[in-house]
Image: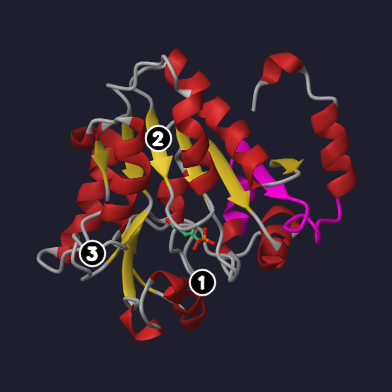
């Protein structure tokens, strides 16, 4: 089962996950990070410069989870731009070592296979950061996505387009399609770290952690993975039946275990 860590706020979550990433990079300087976008991972990215002080990041590699299809890569909300702005530049990573799926229309039918091949060639993702959509998606694997799916083009639900309209001038500007790592791709990462904050995520979190494993709630795919850490605030934990046990287990966690 996923380890669930309930923290007081986003900052505490960011510090916890950033420390884990720093420890990974110290052990493995060419670690492969799986990078999410959206609001959720921002506290991690904000905490990383301090956590990585004095750590050599020149060899770190990374793969973003997803990208909008057909959006100009220079658009400030393309995930290529977001990863550059929130991760590569502040941490001083080598841009050549950080990849984002190619959302350009030219050859789009091959971009997913190319991306999966590049992840495999890198030896797989060591630590995959995940957010979760209010409809239960991870990456942009919307409800109904196959657990065996690979990186490919998906159509966003209207709910997700409404949720993401805040990044654009209007909902009409939110692209209809994305290219996203599949659930099968994500499940191959060695460690999944799913974060969620706020009451709006409580239902999706409860479904992902404690609900039936079903493609109707793609986040529930995490139950199939042997090493998952779910880091959430109290509001996002509100619908979890086992919250008291998760707090107890984390308070008594053997020190040698790490996250
Ligand atoms: C982003 C991604 C999505 C988001 C999810 C939550 O790369 O893959 O699954 O994590 O839509 O978005 P936020 O964090 O903005 O609530």
- CA separation, marks 2 and 3? 24 Å
Question: Which of the two marks, 2 or 3, is nearer to us in this view?
Answer: 3
Q: In which quadrant is the C terminus drawn?
A: top right
Q: Secondary structure at mark 1?
A: loop
> Which residue is under mark 2?
33
Dot placed on the residue nearer the N-terminal end, 1 or 3: 3
Q: Is residue 230 magenta?
A: yes
Please tell me which residue is depicted at 20% across the width and 49% down the height of the picture. 114
Please tell me which residue is depicted at 45% across the width and 15% down the height of the picture. 26
Q: Position of residue 203 (x, y in %)?
A: 72, 66
Q: Secondary structure at mark 2?
A: strand
Q: Is residue 72 magenta?
A: no
Quarter residue 171 falls in: bottom left
> Which residue is under mark 3?
75
Q: Position of residue 22 (x, y in %)?
A: 49, 23
Crowding at dot 3, Cα within 10 Å, few <14 / some 14-19 / many 20+, comes out as few
The span shown in magenta is 220-242
Front in this rendered view, residue 35 or 179: 35
Question: Which of the two marks, 1 or 3, is nearer to us in this view?
Answer: 3
Q: Which mark is residue 144?
A: 1
Q: Position of residue 60 (x, y in %)?
A: 32, 26
């Amino acid at each position: 089962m996923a380890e669930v860590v309930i923290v007081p706020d986003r900052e505490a979550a960011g510090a916890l996950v950033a420390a884990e990433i720093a420890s990974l990079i110290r052990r493995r300087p060419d670690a492969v990070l799986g990078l999410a976008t959206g609001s959720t991972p921002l506290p991690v990215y904000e905490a990383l410069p301090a956590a990585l002080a004095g750590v050599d990041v020149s060899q770190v590699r990374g793969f973003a989870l997803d990208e909008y299809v057909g959006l100009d890569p220079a658009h400030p909300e393309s995930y290529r731009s977001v990863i550059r702005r929130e991760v590569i530049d502040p941490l001083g990573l080598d841009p050549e070592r950080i990849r984002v799926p190619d959302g350009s229309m030219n050859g789009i039918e091959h971009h997913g296979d190319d991306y999966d091949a590049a992840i495999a060639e890198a030896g797989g993702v060591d630590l995959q950061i995940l957010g979760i959509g209010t409809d239960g998606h991870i990456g942009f694997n919307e409800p109904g996505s196959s657990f065996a799916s690979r990186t490919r083009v998906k159509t966003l639900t209207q709910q997700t387009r409404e949720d993401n309209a805040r990044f654009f001038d209007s909902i009409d500007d939110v692209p209809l399609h994305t290219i996203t790592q599949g659930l099968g791709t994500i499940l191959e990462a060695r460690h999944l770290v799913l974060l969620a904050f706020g009451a709006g995520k409580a239902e999706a979190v409860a479904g992902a952690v404690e609900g039936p494993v079903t493609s109707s709630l793609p986040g529930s795919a995490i139950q199939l993975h042997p090493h998952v850490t779910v880091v959430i605030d109290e509001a996002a934990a509100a619908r979890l039946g086992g919250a008291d046990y998760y707090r107890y287990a984390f308070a008594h966690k053997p020190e040698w275990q790490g996250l």
